[in-house]
Image: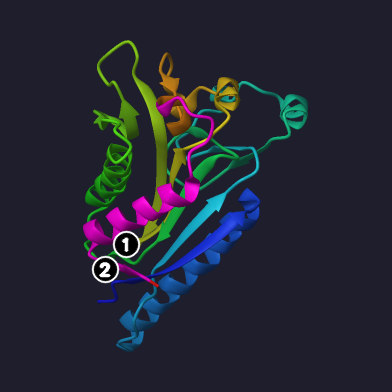
Amino acid sequence: MNKTIKLQDLGTKDFKATWDYQEVLFKDILDTKIKNRREAAGLETDNHFLFVEHPHVYTLGKSGDMSNLLLNESQLTQKGATFYKINRGGDITYHGPGQIVGYPILDLDNFFTDIHKYLRFLEEIIILTLGEYGLKAVRSPGETGVWLDVGTPFARKICAMGVRASRWVTMHGFALNVNANLGYFDNIIPCGIRGKAVTSLNNELSVTNVDEADVKRKLLKHFEVLFEARFV
């Protein structure tokens, strides 16, 4: 089993270009697995992790409802935003500047073959990272992602998640609001959940800007521990 993960920080990159790149990496892993199965080739499969920040974009998952996007085409243009229907689970979400997006493209045969456990581990990485900033983040029953003050009138989501998996190979991932412009969430019903707010780490800490490089270091540290992996 290969527990090394190739890490790339793509900086700011267009959503569609990043999605296309994910698909290339995803297909390469799948092709290796198919070759191993058909030819008993015994080839090692790669694992990848991409950090990226997208320009303003709204994405709708396979099970999403278009009515959760509250803008028409011309309004999207006015906001400087784009929109894509994509092949992950979940409903609608927003990506933009000040948000750390993580895309693990893993062969779970190298780790564990349990999608439920995989999602819980992604959530736990966020929860542990936010804990280092003094925030008590939790899961919300029946709602994937990471939240604050669940079970109160002040419940608010700080990290959205949506993944795709085929033959235990994953793509897409999480979006953690760090220094995000929360006004862009007003244009959607985030994840299709009405009546719950969205927040950002800088907002919770009452600061103008949180060091995103430091957040990334913490995320990677907890990822390595939980997945018993090593980034290269």
The circle drawn on residue 3 is none
Magenta stretch: give its range: 205-231
Q: Is 190 above or below relative to 98?
A: above
Question: What predominant SS class does the magenta segment belong to?
Answer: helix
Residue for point 60% across, 26% down: 184
Residue for point 49% across, 55% down: 51
- Say which element carries label 2: helix
Taking the image as drawn, is residue 173 in sight?
Answer: no
Q: Is 166 above or below relative to 196?
A: below
Q: Residue 161 lies in what quarter of the image?
A: top left
Give the percent coordinates (x, y) of residue 29: 42, 72
Give the percent coordinates (x, y) of residue 174: 42, 45
Amino acid type of the residue that numbered disc 2 sits on in the rendered structure: Asp
Label 2: how many Cα within 10 Å (few below 14, some 14–19, many 20+)? some
Taking the image as drawn, is residue 29 in sight?
Answer: yes
Residue for point 64% across, 57% down: 17
Q: Is 62 above or below relative to 152?
A: below
Amino acid type of the residue that numbered disc 1 sits on in the rendered structure: Trp
Image quadrant where one finds the C terminus: bottom left
Image quadrant where one finds the N terminus: bottom left
Q: Pointer 2 and pointer 1: residues touching (CB < 8 Å)?
A: yes
Give the percent coordinates (x, y) of residue 202: 47, 31
What distance separates the C-alpha of mark 2 from that of mark 1? Answer: 6 Å
The verdict on residue 145 being magenta is: no
Label 1: how many Cα within 10 Å (few below 14, some 14–19, many 20+)? some
Residue furthest out toward the front = 207
- Say which element carries label 1: loop
Q: Name the N-terminal-most of marks 2 and 1.
A: 2
Q: Nearer the viewer, residue 139 or 75?
A: 139
Q: Nearer the viewer, residue 141 or 217?
A: 217
Question: Which residue in the structure is indicated by mark 2?
Answer: 109
Question: Which residue in the structure is indicated by mark 1?
Answer: 168
